[in-house]
Image (spheres, rainbow, N blue to C red):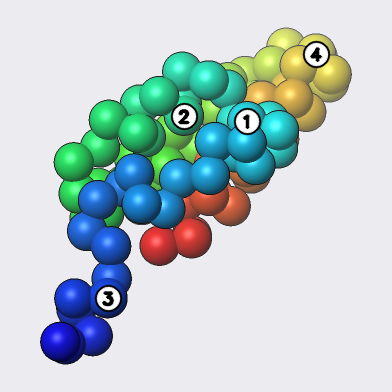
Amino acid sequence: MSADDLVPQKVEAILNPGRMLADGIPYPDFAAARALDDLAEWLPFWAETAGRYEALGMAALEAGDRVSGGEWLWHSSLSWHYGQLM
C-alpha cells in the first residue's frame, strides 16, 4: 500500500456537512462541492466561489451597503477557508 492509497480521491470522503453548514457555507455551495468528482477540483471550485462572493461584497461596499458587503466578504473568506483544506 502506498501513501497515495491512503489519500481519499473522492470529495465525499472529506465533506463534513454538519460543520460546513453550521459554519455558514450556503447549502447550494455545499451541494455543488459535493458534486465534484475529484479532489483536484476542490481548490478551483472554492477559489471561484470566493471570487464571486468577493465581487459581490466589494460592489455592496462601493454602493455604501456595509452590512451586505461584510456578509458577502465573510462568505468569500469562508470559501477560501474551506478551499485550503485540501
User: Which of 70/18 is in front?
Assistant: 18
Q: Which mark is residue 21?
A: 1
Q: Earlier in the sequence, mark 1 or mark 4?
A: 1
Going from N to C along the chain, the mark reached first, 1 or 3, is 3
Q: Secondary structure at mark 1?
A: helix
Sequence-wise, the earlier of marks 4 and 3 is 3
The answer to whether the residue labelled 1 contacts the one labelled 3, judged by CB atoms less than 8 Å apart, is no
Comes first in the chain, label 1 or label 2: 1
Residue 20 seen = yes
How far apart, in angstroms, are the residues tagged by discs 1 and 2? Answer: 8 Å
Q: Disc 1 to disc 3, how far (Cα)?
A: 27 Å
Q: Which is more N-terminal, label 2 or label 4?
A: 2
| Left-right relation of 36 to 46 | left
Counting residues from the N terminus, which is met first, the one under dot 2 or under dot 3? 3
Q: CA distance from mark 1 to mark 4?
A: 25 Å
> Which amino acid is tagged 1?
Leu
Mark 2–mark 3 Cα distance, whole angstroms, equals 24 Å
Q: Which residue is mark 2?
A: 30
Cβ atoms at labels 4 and 2 below 8 Å apart: no
Q: Name the residue that disc number 4 marks.
A: 65
Q: Secondary structure at mark 4?
A: loop
Corner quadrant of residue 77: top right
Question: At x 20% / y 49%, what residue is drawn?
Answer: 38
Decide which of 54, 33 is in the foreground and name it: 33
Give the CA distance from mark 4 to mark 2: 26 Å
Task: Report how far apart the C-alphas of labels 4 and 3 lie in the structure.
Answer: 47 Å
Amino acid type indicated by mark 2: Phe
Residue 36's image quarter?
top left
Question: Residue 6 has which mark?
Answer: 3
The N terminus lies in quadrant? bottom left
